[in-house]
Amino acid sequence: MSLHKDFHDHDREITSENKEDVMELIFNHYGENIKALIYTYVKNDAQTDDIFQEFLISVYKNLDGFQHNSKLKTWLYRIAINKSKDYLRSPIHRFFTSYDDQMAPEKIFDTPEEQLIKREVETNVVKAILSLPVKYREIFVLRFYHSYQLKEISEFLDINESTVKTRFMRGKKKLKSKLGGDFLES
C-alpha cells in the first residue's frame, strides 16, 4: 500500500516508510496550509519561511516518536502552532512586525471600481482578523481560511471545544466592533 494513495487515511503506516519519503509527502500534502497557518500568527513572509523550516526540522526529528494518539494532520498542526507561538513569545518577534498585504486573485469580470472596493473590503477584514489577539485569530483562520470544524480546531489547539466556541463568539464580537456591520453573517 502506497502513501501516495489516500495519504490521510494511512497515518499509522508512516513510520514503516522511508523518513525522507514521508517528509516529502508531508511537505506536498500539508506544506502550503501549514505555511498559511504560520503566517496568520507572525504576519511576516520572511519569518513564516523561517518558522516553516523550523517546523520541518522538528517534524523530521520527531517523526519516529509520532505516537498515533491523534491524526497526523492534528500532530503537524500542533507543531506548527507551537512553533508560531514560541516565536511570538521570543524577543526577536519585536523586530519583525511589518504586515505584507496578500490579496486573493480577483475575478476578471469585475470592473476596476468593483475590484478596488472588493480589495479594500478584503484588506480591512484581513487586517481586522490579524489584529485580534492570537487566541481569537487562530480560531478564525482555522475556521474560515482552512474550513475546519470547531471540533478539529479544538484538537489542533489542544483545548476544549467549548473554549473554542467561546473564543469564536468573543472574537466575532470584537470583529463586528472593529468593522461595523454584519460582515460575518454573509
Image: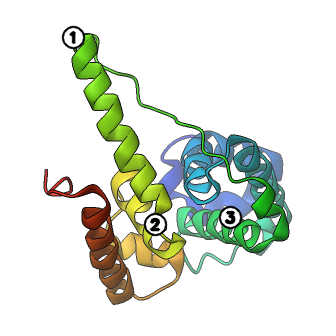
Viewer-nearest residue: 175 or 157: 175
* Vertical position of residue 115 compared to residue 88: above or below: above
Please say if the residues under marks 2 and 3 sit with CB atoms less than 8 Å apart: no
Q: Is residue 32 above or below residue 87?
A: above
Looking at the image, do the residues carrying marks 1 and 3 touch, with CB atoms under 8 Å apart?
no
- Residue 29, percent from left and from top: 57, 44
In the rendered structure, the answer to whether residue 22 lies left or right of residue 118 reads right
* Of marks 2 and 1, the one in the foreground: 2
Relative depth, front residue between 59 and 41: 41
Upstream in sequence: badge 2 or badge 1: 1
**Could you tell me the amino acid type at mark 2?**
Leu
Q: Residue at x 51, y 34 (%)?
A: 102
Of residues 179 and 12, the one drawn nearer to the viewer in this rendering: 179
Q: CA distance from mark 2 to mark 1?
A: 33 Å
Q: Give the residue number, with chain letter if any, for mark 2.
A: 132
Task: Report which quarter residue 45 is drawn in.
Answer: top right
Q: How is the image coloured?
A: rainbow
Local SS, label 1: loop
Residue ID for mark 1:
109
Residue 33: mark: none
Q: Position of residue 176 (x, y in %)?
A: 24, 64
Crowding at dot 1, Cα within 10 Å, few <14 / some 14-19 / many 20+, comes out as few
For this rendering, which residue is in front, 99 or 72? Answer: 99
Check disc 3: other Cα within 10 Å, few if <14, some if 14-19, many if 20+. Answer: many
Report the residue at 75% width, 49% height from top.
47
Residue at the spot of label 3? 84
Residue drawn at x 69%, y 53% as measured from the top left? 97
For marks 1 and 3 on the same chain, the one whose residue lies earlier in the sequence:
3
Spatial CA span between label 2 and label 3: 15 Å
Amino acid on which the number 1 mark rests in the picture: Phe
